[in-house]
Each structure stands twice: as C-alpha cells, then as structure tokens.
Amino acid sequence: MMGWLLTLAILFFTTAVSAAAISPSNYPNHHSIRFVNNTSARGNAMVLPLFFKQRNSNRLNDDFFTRRHLHARTIPNARMPLHDDLLLNGYYTTRLWIGTPPQQFALIVDTGSTVTYVPCSTCRQCGKHQDPRFQPESSSTYEPLKCNIDCSCDSNREQCIYERQYAEMSSSSGVLGVDIISFGNQSDLQPQRATFGCENMETGDLYSQHADGIMGLGSGDLSIVDQLVEKGVISDSFSLCYGGMDVGGGSMVLGGISSPKEMAFSRSDPIRSPYYNIELNEIHIAGKKLPLNPKVFDGKHGTVLDSGTTYAYLPQAAFEAFKAAILEETQSLKRIQGPDPNYNDICFAGAGSDAAQLSKAFPSAEMVFSNGQKLLLAPENYLFRHSKVHGAYCLGIFQNGKESTTLLGGIIVRNTLVTYDREHEKVGFWKTNCSELWERLHLLPASPPLPSDTDEVNSTTGIAPMLAPTGPQAPGEVKIGLIKFSMLLTINYTELKPHISELAQFIAKDLDVKPSQVQLTNYSSGGNETLLRWAILPAHYDDYISNATAMKIVSRLSGNQLHLPDSFGSYELSEWSMEPPPQRTWWQQHYLDLVIAFAVVIVIGMLASGGWFIWRRNQNQAEVPYKPVDSVVAEQELQPLQN
C-alpha cells in the first residue's frame, strides 16, 4: 500500500510540474537564460498611460478601456513625471526635450534656481552625464540670444551669457539660446519657444552629477515658469509631488490645477525673499508645541522651500528644541552611530524595516502656519534610512550652522503635493500618495498617440513630444502580463555574453523589479553593437504586473532612464510594448490548489497506513503463545560440521 501511494504521488507531482511549465510558453520565444536574485531595488514611481497593442485590430478592446475625458480647462498645463530618488541621488529630475528634432535631457527640478541649462556640444569643461550634450548645430530651430541691454554679454558683445554659483561651491556658466522646448506625452501643453542656457563650463557637484543639468523653477525672467506665464500659455502656478521613503519619482505640473479642499495654505511673500517662502509659526511634536518664539522662523530669508535641497535645516534654537522633543518621544529606541563617522548624525535602531509602521515608533510632527492652518509630517518627512544598519533611521533635520534662515528641503514634502500659487502669493500642501497623484486628483494623464495596426511594438526612438490627443483611457486596473523592450548597446566589453547576468541585475534595479523577472529573449551582435531583447515578467506567483509597477517601468523605458555603469558603454532603448496575460486553462489556474489538496490526502493516507502497520504488529505479538522458561523443547537435529 505504501508503495502504491508513493508511486501515485510521484505521478501526480510530475503532471503538476509539467502543467506549470506550460504557462510560460504562452509568452513569446523566451530563451532559457534567466537570472535569479532575492534582492529588489527601490525605484521610481511614475505616472504614464497604459495601453495594449491589439493584434489584427485597429482599435482598442472595450474590455480593457472606456472613454474618459479630461476636465475642461481654459488654460492647459504641462504634466510631467519626476524620476530618480531624493536620498539616493540627492535630487529629482524630469525629462525635457529641446530643439528640432528634439534632443532629450534629464534636468534637476530646482525651485532655488532660475536658469534652465544643459551641457553644450562646445563645452570646454563638462562632466559625463546621462545624455549626450545639446548640439545647437543639429537643431533647425535654435537661435543664439544676441547681446542686448537686458542681459550680460560675452567679451565680444555678441551673445548673452549666464553665470550661476551655488552654496556647495559648484558653478555653471555658458551662453543663452532660444529653441523649441517640449514637455512630454503626458502634457497637454504644446511645445514652446523658450530661452535656456547652453553650458560651456561646470564645476563641483554639477560636474560629477549623473543628471544633465538644471530646470529652473524659481522666480525671474529666465525661469521656465516665468517664460511660459509671460506667453500666456499657463497660469502663474506650478506643483511638485515627491515620492515617499521607499518610492522614488513623483509628478510635476507646470500651470494651475484644481486644489484639493483639504490643502493647507500659507502666505508666500515675494517681497520678503527672492526664494519661495512660507510663514511658519510653530512646530508641534506628538501634539505638543515646541517652546519657541515664532520669530525664530523669520530670520534673514524666513522659511524657504527649496526642492533642490535634500534635507531640512533649522536655526540653532529651533533645531535644539526639535531634537530634544524627538529624543523624549523615542526613549524606547536604541541610539546608534550614524552611517558616516564624519557627521554626528542622530540615529535610532529598533523601529523595524517597514516604513509604513514608523508611526508606531516615532512621533508625528506638525508645522503650523501664521493663518492657523497645519501640515502634518509623518516620520518619513523627517527621517532617512540608515545606510549600514537594517531597520535603523536617522534625523533628516539639521542645524543650519550660524544661519538664521529656515530651509525646508525635499524630505519635508515627501508624499506631499506642493502647489506654488504665485498668482495668489501662497503655497499649498496636501498629504497624498504621489505615485497615484492623477487618480487622487481625479485626472488621468494624457495618452500618447496610439500605434498603428502595422506596428509590432511602440517605438520610442526619435519620438517628438507633442500635444497628445484625448483618447481611450484606462479607468481601472488593466491586467498586464508582459512588458517587452529592445536595447542597443555600444559595448566596452570584447565579449558581452559573460556579463549578461550582471546587466540584467542592473536593469532590474533601475526598473524596481526582481532580477528573476528580467528575462533575455533574444541576443544578436555585430561589431561593437549588440541588440538585446528583454521581457519583464510578473513576480513569482503573480498572474500579471500591477498597474503601478507597469507605470514605473514604462516611464523609465520611454524616457531612456536606465542607469547602467560606464563599463557597459552607451545604450539606446528602441522599442517597448505590453501584452495582456495569456489565457490559462482551468487546470493551469487550479493546479496548485489540487497539488496541495492531494498532498494533504497523501499525508493523511501515510499516517493512516503507519497507524495500521503498528496496530497489526502489536496484534501479531499478542498471538504468540507464552512458554515457560523450563518447558521442554523439541530436540534439534545437529548439523554435521563442515571441513
């Protein structure tokens, strides 16, 4: 009986495994190269419309989409995704296209800067950045800004120039030019002519950073916001929404939006400071007001918002009070040394690694404005993860040296929509999940032009950002079973094949998926160029890729936002497409449940068989007759000895 049960179990498990192996075959031409790793990198949370290429059809399937129109607006705005991560990179970037044909750039969004600039092909001292330098000679619409009374001029009095220096001792300088600037396929704002800087020299952090340049959102004639407002194409407002502690990226809007009714506002006085400021009066920790005079937040430039700064910096008195209140509320946590011995960071261990549970170990905080309105700060708004101790956190609030200015960087507004309403001289704050901003504002991003029926995939090569037409939108969860894309590598390795696994891990890290989800489907090379075709599969045990994950992946792909080491040379993403999950049979959907049920039956059967065997053995022993020790035993015949 035991042998029969084991044989049946082996046959059943073999059948089940075979059925499981059938499912991936529904995906197109997947080779056996697969990379497994249990680590998962943090990544970006982007907002991008999703749609499937429907084979043998010139329209979208109604099962996936229904029509939904954008809210009517008299003045359009430019909705743009933010990329990168505040603490890993120190900044957020957005994509901007300049010239005809458009050349794309990753620019740091900076409310503390006014000039938008990118490295120029003529730059004498520029670092190696994410994208190729801007080539004015390749743009048919580029014009240098000629010397005039409203600008600083070069030594020959021929062209306008700019020079910028920053507190961290970095600098940028170059010439000013005018060209077509485009804002991407999420924007319903058409491309506009604008003035920008073409860098000829950069130093310090600007030289070594991965991003290409700066997008100036400050107040001034050269600010991209001021230029668009001056043209009358947007209202005098813009908004930023940074991702949370474990989610990079976010969203940006150039132009006005309908403010949520829960948004808390503070007056922002443009005369008080050349920077965006708010009227901060009080800070509360765990519901208790810090013992501070409101004037402590009004020194020098007042309380300044700076999206280009990572952390927050308080005047000495405010910092000491803030630190004391946090230490009072976290006595159950262990104080540990910070990640960098050169800094006296205030760090805690014992809170656990789940950022969603931080409020159980750390107190909430509140910023109270002069009008009485409040902004709630979760622990993620004043903490950052310890880079060397798992489950440990450090204060992201520091003393601002001898300065009396209060400087609030990006950490304060993580998962917060910040609206800079310049027209009405106020700044609004709304706590929200920035990776779901459009849905929470009841707006869907504009969709890119739909592919033609003859297109095999959606090409991103040479696509000029344009005004996207209103079209079919995804109202809810669209099931995505597969994301494919092609990568053309100009390699530095003489032989790339041994490094494929390493490359897959870098791709997985940037797309914020597990390496086991990244699968190479095709590989061909010629000269020093290699064409690789990849597929992103659902996570293990999942039937499809979630919308949020797919949005992040597609945004990175459409913006060529993979950060590969220099050892892999340069790359270009030429194609990407998405497909719905394959139809699975009833057996494929339920085989795991059947395997578990049958395993339970086998275990119960084996236990029953074992119990029956023990009972039979005891019965046999009981049937043996009792023989006294001195009883007569039949004489045994002696066997002859063998020689």
Image (spheres, rainbow, N blue to C red):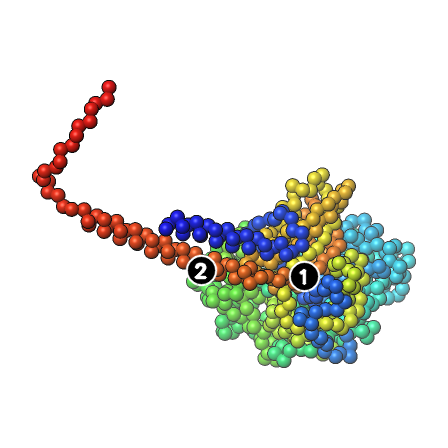
Left or right: 331, with 301 as reference point: left
Q: Nearer the viewer, mark 1 or mark 2?
A: 2
- In primary-sequence order, the first of circles 1 and 2 is 1
**Residue 597, position as x, y percentages in the image:** 44, 60
Neighbour tally class for label 1: few under 14, some 14-19, many 20 plus, Cα within 10 Å? some
How far apart are the two marked residues, 1 and 2, measured between alpha carbons? 33 Å
Answer with the quarter of the image where residue 467 lies: bottom right
In the rendered image of this protein, does residue 97 appear above or below residue 201?
A: below
Residue 345 image label: none
User: Badge 2: few (under 14), some or many (20 or more) residues near its Cα, within 10 Å?
Assistant: few
* Residue 254: quadrant of the picture: bottom right
Residue kind at label 2, given as amino acid type = Ala
Q: 637 or 161: nearer the eye? A: 637
Task: Identify the residue at image location x=67%, y=61%.
Answer: 579
Looking at the rendered structure, the secondary structure element under dot 2 is helix
Q: Which residue is mark 1?
A: 579
Looking at the rendered structure, which numbered label has been put on residue 597? 2
Left or right, 148 with reference to 83: right
